[in-house]
Image: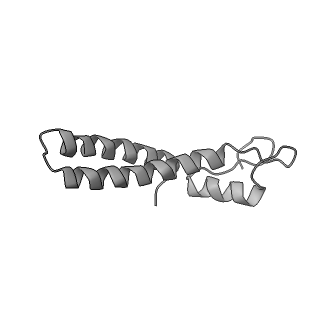
Amino acid sequence: MATGPEHYREAERLAGMAHHFTYGDGADPVAGGALATEGLLHATLALAAATAMSAPVDGAETGMGTPEFAAWYEAAGVKPRPKGGDPE
């Protein structure tokens, strides 16, 4: 499992490798295509994490409910802070 930022970094890394194998001196377009596909998966997961984490939560605004928001924070490796902003 990876956090949203880790998925983002992995997508960037795989995009570079895919370019090398598809267009560079790696000369293996099949491997390049596989790397590009895996990179797209990581980019999609990073986008999902970033989108979910941007939703407001305190009940006054529209957005994701508190349990779902907390689950995304947990999945992204960031602990939600208690109301008031002070760490526990």
Which residue lies most toward the right here?
A: 60
What is the total number of numbered labels drawn onto the structure image?
Answer: 0
Side of 65 relative to 54 (left or right) = right
- Residue occupying the point 50% across, 53% down: 45
- Give the colour scheme of this rendering: one colour
Side of 67 relative to 5 (left or right) = right
- Residue occupying the point 82% across, 47% down: 58
Answer with the quarter of the image where residue 56 lies.
top right
Horizontal and vertical percent for residue 7? Answer: 44, 49
Horizontal and vertical percent for residue 25? Answer: 11, 40
Horizontal and vertical percent for residue 88? Answer: 72, 50
Side of 12 relative to 69 (left or right) = left
Side of 32 relative to 67 (left or right) = left
- Viewer-proximal residue, 39 or 29? 29
- Residue occupying the point 13% across, 45% down: 26
**19 relative to 82, above or below:** above
Horizontal and vertical percent for residue 65? Answer: 77, 56
